[in-house]
Image (cartoon, grey):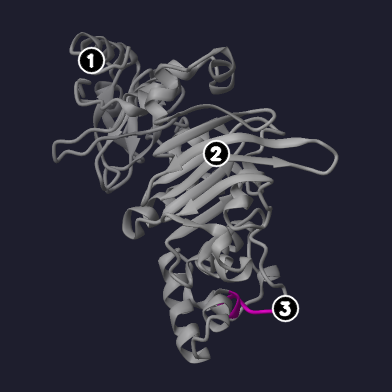
Amino acid sequence: MIEFQAVTKRYDDGTVAVDHLDLTIDDGRITVLVGPSGCGKTTSLRMINRMVEATSGTILVDGEDIRSQPAAALRRGIGYVIQNAGLFPHRTVLDNVATVPMLLGTKKAVARKRAEELLATVGLPPELARRYPSQLSGGQQQRVGVARALAADPPVLLMDEPFSAVDPIVRDDLQDELLRLQSELGKTIVFVTHDIDEAIKLGDRVAVLRVGGKLAQYASPAELLANPVDDFVASFVGRDRGYRALGFLSAHGVEVNPVPTVAVGTPVADARERLEGGWAAVVDDAGRPLGWVSEVVLSTLDKAVTATDVVSGGSLYPVDTGGRAGSLRAALDAALSSPAALGVAVDGDGAVVGAVTAESVLKALADARRAGEVPS
């Protein structure tokens, strides 16, 4: 557990970056600090490992004042991941990851072996181990940064906007990878971001800070979206917070209906017979969706459906056929982004199992409200 007790950071010019912060961060969870520029989120994070010294107040890690040991010793027991990874450019990927264990006295061969295991853990192939950071993509460098932070197996991991410098697709992959790692490792993670969507996706708890370093609200993502404490939090979370909140509601009540499918190479006459509402989903040999084909397109074809006739199909709704379901947000997004107004539902292997409509999602939401499953 990490505790901030009346912690203030005031700089020599009188600027108050963090103002009397009281905050308790639970063990084994991801706590996200989020807020606008100048709200003190990075300063708060850096005070935990004493890269910034608090002006007043106390920070405890597992009940022990962080000032009870030298700053260097404290930092060696806390993982730290920053923007652009912060890797040593003159060291190979393997030696970057092995750095902290070797500083702690681990033999080089043992540290390198551990580094190889960690590279696999964060999803990097072994052939990258002998490369240098400049030879990696931005996303790969960030994975190395996470591996290096985990190398000494620290109980606490600090992450300062680690994914902000990569493109949106890579960022989404890295977020998913972090959630996967956390499910396996159960670290106490303090994560800083300015992106409320990232905070809601990653955080077990989210601390929203105001400019000047004051805590505005500290809550679970679902509670934050449903009940912002004031206008500032409501504005920061965004006007579409109701839509975001659907991500925390199960889509178990959404009706999944059959959807017509055709394959590339299906004769035009056969494809037309399978249309429903003027559309059919195009699937590959394994039943995975490739997109859609419409009656309008088919009317221009002579023989068979080709790959160039496929219209992009929007997002997918992953549904677990074992009895669990995805979120209402995923189901609604699939329906709204589909050119056919039918959200394609897929199983764990990515194969089509049916389709959902926006109307069926909204009906499930209304049913959840009546059942008291939606926070008021």
Dot 3 crowding, Cα within 10 Å, few <14, some 14–19, many 20+: few
Depth check, front residue: 47 or 166: 47
SS assignment at label 2: strand
Residue 368: which numbered mark, if any? 1
Does the CB distance between marks 2 and 3 fall below 8 Å?
A: no
Mark 1 or mark 2, earlier in chain: 2
Measured Cα–Cα span from mark 2 to mark 3: 33 Å
User: Which residue corresponds to the image point at 50% horizontal and 17% vertical from the top-left?
Assistant: 240
Dot 2 crowding, Cα within 10 Å, few <14, some 14–19, many 20+: many
Residue 121's place in the image compared with 320, above or below, is: below
On whether residue 136 falls in the magenta region, the answer is no
Residue type at numbered disc 1:
Ala
Residue tagged 3 = 90
Q: Which residues are magenta?
A: 90-96
Q: Is residue 50 left or right of residue 106?
A: right
Residue type at numbered disc 2:
Leu
